[in-house]
DNA sequence: GGCATGATTGACCGGTCGGTCAATCTATTT
DNA sequence: AAATAGATTGACCGACCGGTCAATCATGCC
């Protein structure tokens, strides 16, 4: 830190390492490092609990530099939200592009979404912070919702899905079942059997199995 | 403020209103007022976002008085959690006491819990803060969970509920469906139909109807 | 009427918050 | 080589944070 100002410039110029390629100031990398550090601390403590000083320290830069690149804490928080949700958008796009509308789409979506949240706990916490922190102005205009509703209605028209339930409610319920599990998995006890006997993922497997089974049979049209 | 120290005691003694009954210092009422103000601000901004000064101002007392009664901010937050969850515990106790184990218990529980959360939005936000704010240490050893699991197992033994699903997962899913809806109702868009056409409760009604229908049929034993 | 006890107040404290600013360093352009 | 623009730094600021303290007030007890 103080080395550069104290040491004469000759010393600072000494290292003649090949400063090509990666050896530069590279503001892009700096921005990325800041966003990475901010993401970690925002996800952990929320936008109110994380401090600019801690973020700067974790990113290895000065607080002023963060303001130089992002302006204010709110704008940094906005950038973190944008970058943090990216994995979710990527996953959603991949799902919607790779799958045609067939009858196993709903079940597969549940399984995929569940496993995606399981693999991305940071996304889960980010969604919670985004939902509760401000008055939560912005809506979540989710392609997954609108498109899921459309395909569910199509299934109802074809007689594959029972017609006496609101499609949008089914989609919201499906998302709730997946998201809520990981948001509250540490606070929901493990029941009478204690917590130690099952290897932490067994409960998740059993849960996924149960909701898939119940949803599949619960959405089947009445057979008579 | 300074009136009391400047004015002679005779002036202060002037009001001879009947100071019996409610005309006293009443530290109990003060504590209650502090808890009420703190609950409101904690629910709104979370334990990190709410400040002691704001709480004191809203309660109409001094910051020092809060420390006199509760010690620290953490202890006040603990008191708020305790008092804020009370409606939930009351509701739970009422449900468990008033109902015997019959076949409509599960469906009725869903409906009751859903409507309880709908009527107590503060409880919903409190649960979110409690789950995310600290490292979220404490578990939620919920009588509702353990007892629900027990009765679900009983239903499975009697052949009323399909036996190939984990009872605990069903209970957790039922709670998730209710809680998540109100935690994210403002962030989940209203879909292609826009938000204005339905009177804000219609979506909740449709949702409750859908999850009850799907759960009821999805938990029925296989008929052949 | 004194007297102890607790409720209540306002002034104050060290620390941290988000944010600003002038200066220095780096890198590109001319 | 000079100049220009941007990246980066450390020192600094006022505001607010949670918390403390001595003093005053109200109240019940002897």
Image (cartoon, coloured by chain):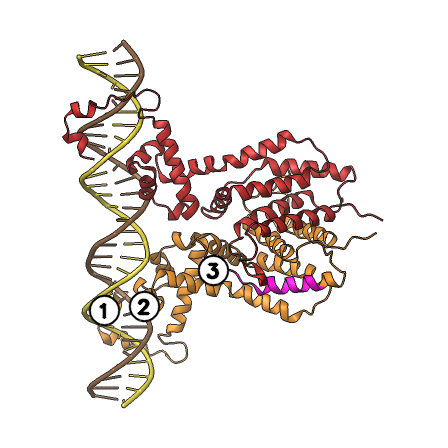
Chain colours: A orange, B red, C yellow, D brown
Are marks 1 and 3 in one subunit?
yes
Q: Does the image show residue A32?
A: yes
Q: Earlier in the sequence, mark 1 or mark 3?
A: 1
Q: Nearer the viewer, residue A19 or A148?
A: A148
Callout 1 secondary element: helix
- Picture layout, residue D19 above or below residue A129: above
3 or 2: mark nearer the eye: 3
Task: Give how far apart the Cα atoms at labels 1 and 2 are.
Answer: 21 Å
Are marks 1 and 2 in one subunit?
yes
Q: Which residue is mark 3?
A: A138
Q: Does the image show residue A185?
A: no
What secondary structure is the magenta-colored segment mainly? helix
- Picture layout, residue D29 above or below residue A15: above
Residue at 31% across / 32% down in the picture? B68
Q: Earlier in the sequence, mark 3 or mark 2?
A: 2
Q: How many marks?
A: 3
Q: Determine which quarter of the picture holds residue A32.
A: bottom left
Task: Pinpoint residue A146: horizontal percent, then vertical percent.
Answer: 60, 63
Are marks 3 and 2 in one subunit?
yes
Q: Which residue is mark 1?
A: A5
Label 1 chain ID: A
Label 2 chain ID: A
Q: Earlier in the sequence, mark 1 or mark 2?
A: 1
B77 left or right, relative to B181: left
Residue A68 badge: 2
Task: Give how far apart the Cα atoms at labels 1 and 3 are.
Answer: 46 Å
Give the crowd class for mark 3: few <14, some 14-19, many >=20 residues within 10 Å: few
Residue range corresponding to the magenta coloring: A140-154
Give the crowd class for mark 1: few <14, some 14-19, many >=20 residues within 10 Å: few
Work out which quarter of the rendered image holds the N terminus of chain B and state it.
Answer: top left
- Picture layout, residue B30 above or below residue A108: above
């Amino acid at each position: 830190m103080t080395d550069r100002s104290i040491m004469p410039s000759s010393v600072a110029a000494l290292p003649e390492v090949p400063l090509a390629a990666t050896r530069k100031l590279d503001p892009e990398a700096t921005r990325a490092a800041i966003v990475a550090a901010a993401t970690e601390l925002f996800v952990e403590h929320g936008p109110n609990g994380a401090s600019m000083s801690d973020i700067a320290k974790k990113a290895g830069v000065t607080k002023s530099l963060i303001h130089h690149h992002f302006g204010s804490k709110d704008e940094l928080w906005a950038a973190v939200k944008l970058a943090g949700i990216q994995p979710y958008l990527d996953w959603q796009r991949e799902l919607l592009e790779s799958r045609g509308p067939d009858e196993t789409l709903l079940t597969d979506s549940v399984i995929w979404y569940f496993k995606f949240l399981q693999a991305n706990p940071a996304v889960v916490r980010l969604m919670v912070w985004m939902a509760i922190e401000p008055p939560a102005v912005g809506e979540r205009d989710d392609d997954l919702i609108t498109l899921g509703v459309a395909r569910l209605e199509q299934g109802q028209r074809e007689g594959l899905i029972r017609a006496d339930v609101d499609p949008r409610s089914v989609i919201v319920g499906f998302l709730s079942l997946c998201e809520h599990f990981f948001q509250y998995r540490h606070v929901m006890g493990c029941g009478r059997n204690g917590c130690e006997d099952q290897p932490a993922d067994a409960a998740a497997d059993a849960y996924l199995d149960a909701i898939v089974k119940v949803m599949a049979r619960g959405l089947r049209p009445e057979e008579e």
